[in-house]
Structure formats: structure tokens, C-alpha cells
Amino acid sequence: MIIGNMESGDIPLISHQNTNNGVAKYIKRLEHRCLFNYRNTVALADRGVFYATTHNQNFHIRTRVKALVFKEKNISRNIRLFFVVAINRLQIKFIEYSANATDKLSNERISLPVYQNNQIAFDFMEDFIKSIEKAHIDNIYRFWQNKLSAYKDVVAGSGG
């Protein structure tokens, strides 16, 4: 499956690259390849970059990429993001390009928040990602407010 020979379309093809959220190209549906449901799947580049990604539409994967499928059917975007970050924290352990990280992954522990009864705290993950996004949006808003204020000062002739 050579990427350059694939017909362009609207389905993301996820590769083992760590740029563009792993999307190598948008292609037409591949009839004899699994189309992964983005709502319950995280893509994981297992060689070279060990890079987990989540997407907002169904996708195909290339070689050197695995699909980690949740047992639950509809995992929220925020919970998938939390898992992606938790998995990507392990990247440093798999920096040797030729190493197949998923062969060793079963020996790794991915830190997740749990309650005292050892149940995974999915609601915490959801709220945590929301709070990070809110803080980021607030920072961007303050940044642009400062830029706008400086612009207004220059236009009014009192700054610059």
C-alpha cells in the first residue's frame, strides 16, 4: 500500500509519522481494510515514534500503526485525549526506531486516575481535559485582548 498511489478521498489514513496528528493522506475507502470507528479507537504508531492519536472521524491505518479499541462503544473525545496523553508519556521508552513498541507495551503501566474501589475515574478525565481546554482558551483570549489594546493605543496615538 503505497501512499502516493492511493486515490484521494475524505477518510484519514493514519501512518506512523508524528506530524499532522498522524494523518498521511485523505483517501477513498479501502474495501478490504478495516475502517476504524473513531468513537472507540485510538491509533498508535508502534515503531519509531510511538505516537498515539485520536481523531474526529473514522479512519484507516497503515503498517506500523495499531488500533487500540476500547471495550465501550462511544468514548468521549476528552477521555480519548486523556488516554492519548497518558500513552504518549511513555514515548521516551521507545525511541529506538526499529523497536516494535507494542510488543513491549503489555509490560508497561499507563497511569490513569482511579477511585478508592479501583474503578477508572472517567468523569475526572472528562473534567480534567475540559479544564485544560478552558485554561488554554482563556490564555489565548488574554493574549489577543492585549494585542487589541496595544493596537488601539497605537491608533489613538498614545502608544507605540
Image (cartoon, grey):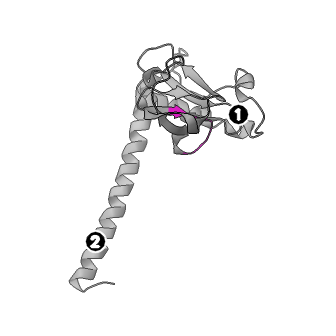
Q: Nearer the viewer, residue 125 or 56?
A: 56
| Above or below for 158 versus 69 | below
How would you rate the neighbour count of disc 1 (Cα within 10 Å): few for under 14, some for 14-19, many for 20 or more?
Answer: many
Q: Which residue: 28% across, 81% down?
A: 154
- Name which residue lies at 40% across and 33% down: 127
Q: CA distance from mark 2 to mark 1?
A: 48 Å
Q: Which structural element holds mark 2?
A: helix
Residue 55 in view in this figure: no
Q: Please state the horizontal and vertical placement of residue 132, each as a whole percent of the image.
A: 43, 43
**The magenta stretch spans residue 25:** no
Is disc 1 placed on a helix, strand or loop? Answer: loop
Q: Quadrant of residue 45?
A: top right
Q: Of the numbered discs in the image, which one, if any, rests on residue 149?
A: 2
Q: Position of residue 148 (x, y in %)?
A: 28, 69
Note whether residue 106 is visible. Answer: yes
Range of residues picked out in magenta: 13-19
* Number of other residues with Cα within 10 Å of mark 2, as a class: few under 14, some 14 to 19, many 20 or more: few
Q: Which mark is residue 47?
A: 1
Question: x%, y% of residue 139?
Answer: 38, 55
In the rendered image, the quadrant that contains the C terminus is: bottom left
Depth order, front residue of 124/24: 24
Residue with the most extreme bottom position: 157
